[in-house]
Amino acid sequence: MFESAHGGSGRVTVDDRRDSRRPEFKPYRHPAAGWGAAKSVTGFILRQREPIDGARALLRMNQENGGFDCPGCAWPDDPGGLHLDVCENGIKHVTWEMTGKRVGRDFFAAHPVRELAKWSDTDLEAQGRLTEPLSYDPGTDRYVPISWPDAFALVGRTLRDLDSPDRAAFYTSGRLGNEATFLYQLMARELGTNNLPDCSNMCHEASGRALKAAIGTGKGTVDVHDWERADALFVFGVNAASNAPRMLTALAGACRRGAQVVHVNPLVEAGATRTIIPHEFARMAAFRTTPTSTKNVQPRIGGDMALVRGVAKALLELAETDPNALDADFLAAHTTGFERYRDVCARTSWAEIEHQSGVAVAEIRALAAVYRAAERTIVSWCLGVTQHEHGVDTVREIVNLLLLRGNIGREGAGPSPVRGHSNVQGNRTCGIDHRPDPAFLDRLGAVCGIEPPRRHGLDTVRTIEAMRRGEVTVFVGMGGNFALAAPDTPYTAEALRNCDLTVQVSTKLNRSHLEHGRRALILPCIGRTEKDHQAAGVQATSVEDAMSMVHLSTGMKRPASPHLLSEPAIIAGMARAALPDSATPWEGYVEDYDRIRDTMAQVLDGFEDFNRRVRQPHGFRIHQPARDREFRTASGRAEFSAAGLPDVVPAPGTLALGTMRSHDQWNTTIYSDNDRYRGIRNLRTLVFMNPDDMRERGLAEFDEVDVTSVAKDGSTRSLLRYRAVPYDIPRGCAAGYMPEMNVLCAIGDYSAQSDQPLMKHLKVTVEPSGRG
Ligand SMILES: Nc1nc2c(c(=O)[nH]1)N[C@H]1C(S)=C(S)[C@@H](COP(=O)(O)OP(=O)(O)OC[C@H]3O[C@@H](n4cnc5c(=O)[nH]c(N)nc54)[C@H](O)[C@@H]3O)O[C@H]1N2
Ligand SMILES: Nc1nc2c(c(=O)[nH]1)N[C@H]1C(S)=C(S)[C@@H](COP(=O)(O)OP(=O)(O)OC[C@H]3O[C@@H](n4cnc5c(=O)[nH]c(N)nc54)[C@H](O)[C@@H]3O)O[C@H]1N2
Ligand SMILES: [Mo]
């Protein structure tokens, strides 16, 4: 059994900026955003020692012409022009990148890796921006400077020496711009592997697979105009106030025009009640709030599919007497599998639906009435739906519900997954996929003159397993923080340490640099806010938002150090060293990114005339056949699914635990130990529980508890001395913070449908500490 008190990484220094380290819990009763957010941002910018540049940068973000794309999330920019529609966390994220602090060679000379390994993750990142390439020296256990040519030569030599290209894996975090993404997958495929694990494997893989099967596209079909026209919005498993704050504006707007906004979440999050809209300064000054919901429904963790099935069943019952409850014309003309789905709904009993969803039948019928009354419905979702065993089935059930009333391919209606990283959708569009579409490979091969491999590659979980077994020996991380973001922290660390070479392309020091292979490189890159000078002048890169809009992002700040390279340049450097005889114009691509875009235009669907269209104001929307009711599925129609309901009810004595982000965090980057909207200060090692579940275990607020997960294979993992916090969450459910709780997620606990780790559904016991 693995035991850890700190989620795999110990905290050794105390941040003296905090007045008190005593944990506090005071339920938050204020609206989301507004002055609390403004105050928090000001403090944060000051701490980064970049007040002037920070403020100037914000005015250059998300502009119609020029400026850089906010790296904070993938929510679209306001198409009506700049409304200062930036959010607290976007600001923090940008300022985080623009910090005036630097971590240079003196720092690495002073601190061996075994010492840094004891530092907290917050302290590692707080050292500031990386300034030059570094190579691990086993003799002194330190990172030492290495020249770019020597670093590339080491990567090239190691890759060339492999007996199979499949011994290397190339990870992407969803920050990477489209042009770099295209070069990265081209390098992997020219080398001969589809081993392209990415953060999507832990994020929206389920959404992509479900939508592809149901409607023939891996993406949502709506845009922001549709959000403005919907008269019912259902939002499943999204903490909007923290993770997609610009969505609050859309939700508040919907409430104001009288639309129904239903949040489905085991927790009632701050963004699911009221907000102060950040750019409406007059209202902000007057503390005038706008509601962001008309209804909140709290299913049990994993209960969403049963809930949606219930809404569909209630709607089908209404249809027996109400001829307009269903869109019969749409069903007949555009769908297949309706009868089977109707039968499955009829056969699923109300008792089972109530038991599995944890929501009373009357409440489910009320949701069906909201859905029936709306002419135009959007269903939106994020990780609360995807990171489950049955994530694919749940997304398909959501599509089933939309199909019943023809809510797809028309204004104001459709599925709308909320993506995470700012360019995670663009990464997939531009070829990061371990299971690539054969037609894409055909075009890539023909246009780029390579023979792309056809066998599927490894995803995130399988890469970790293969590294651990010694089958994958080279790991390249293009951004991200693999060591902490991935499940089963100690197992993943061992897997990385088992590699011959690990290469991390990063902006800041993080845990993935310390859990390294026998040889290791840290290759520092310029960030999105910074000017990218190449032979043909300052370059822009393109990104795609969650609603398929592709637009250019141009950095404006001097790079953090003169020794940084852009991500395309780093990829090209590695590629040339690994493929000395390659006919691909790697150097030419880096001189002028227009040349990369010209090649992409020939390979990628919907990117015709890329260079011209991406320079239009707001860029362009990738054509999506499903938006016009052209469904590229096997049958040529939208396909209903008819899966059975999973059993998600926790066994007696156990709880279903979901891991999630705090308000003051960006994935593995922890800004502080506070979670303002959930009322928490100075505490991350906590578990939110239903007060009755606490009482049953004899627990009072902040009592120390040991949290033990039981994996599919029966193995157990524990986090010791966490604190129990009573919370409004259904019985049998618990929640706590990622990435610390990845210690509890066994490597084998991934979904058979999506291969996603079960990060929102760990089976745990919670006991008072010291009892075991
Ligand atoms: N500030 C900030 N913004 C971010 C990020 C960040 O870390 N910080 N991360 C980015 C990324 S990569 C992503 S993918 C997104 C993530 O955005 P979210 O999906 O909002 O991320 P989580 O914090 O994991 O929160 C999941 C939500 O799902 C709920 N939930 C848990 N289990 C269930 C369930 O079974 N059913 C339902 N219906 N809900 C459930 C939780 O209560 C919580 O509200 O945000 C992106 N934006
Ligand atoms: N338990 C649990 N685990 C989870 C999740 C969960 O909900 N629960 N969520 C999962 C999800 S949705 C995701 S998306 C993953 C996220 O996984 P990752 O994307 O791997 O992790 P991040 O924390 O976003 O990566 C942060 C690092 O990216 C680097 N970085 C920042 N900007 C740049 C840049 O411009 N270029 C480059 N090259 N590097 C940069 C910095 O060095 C920083 O330390 O985590 C997953 N892990
Ligand atoms: Mo994500």
Image (spheres, grey):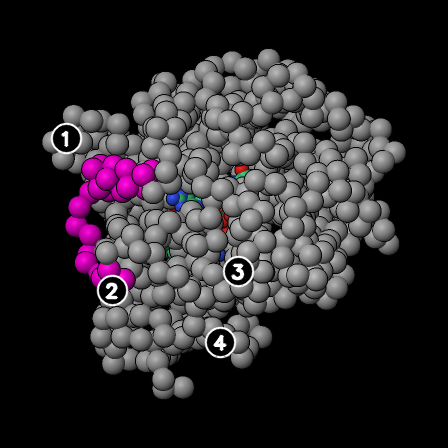
Question: Split into 4 quadrants, where in the image is the C terminus?
Answer: bottom left
**Residue visible at 36% across and 86% down in the picture:** 771
Please report whichever mark, 2 or 4, sits nearer to the chain's N-terminal start: 4
Q: CA distance from mark 1 to mark 2?
A: 32 Å
Q: Which residue is mark 2?
A: 22
Q: Which residue is mark 3?
A: 116
Q: CA distance from mark 2 to mark 4?
A: 24 Å
Q: Viewer-nearest of labels 3 and 2?
A: 3
Q: Which residue is mark 4?
A: 3
The amino acid sitting under disc 3 is Leu
Q: Viewer-nearest of labels 1 and 2?
A: 2
Q: Viewer-nearest of labels 3 and 4?
A: 3
Determine whether the residue tagged by mark 4 lies in a helix, strand or loop: strand
The amino acid sitting under disc 1 is Ala
Q: Residue 360: where, in percent of width, then height?
A: 27, 60
Q: CA distance from mark 3 to mark 4?
A: 21 Å
Question: Disc 2, disc 4: CB below 8 Å?
Answer: no
Q: Which residue is mark 1?
A: 285
Which stretch is magenta? 20-46
Observer able to see residue 534? yes
Badge 3: how crowded within 10 Å, few (<14), some, or many (20+)?
Answer: some
Relative horizontal placement of residue 141, taking residue 372 as reference (left or right): right
Q: Which residue is outermost to the left?
A: 286
Question: Disc 4, disc 1: CB below 8 Å?
Answer: no
The amino acid sitting under disc 4 is Glu
Q: CA distance from mark 3 to mark 2?
A: 26 Å
Which residue occupies the foreground of this view, 639 or 771? Answer: 771
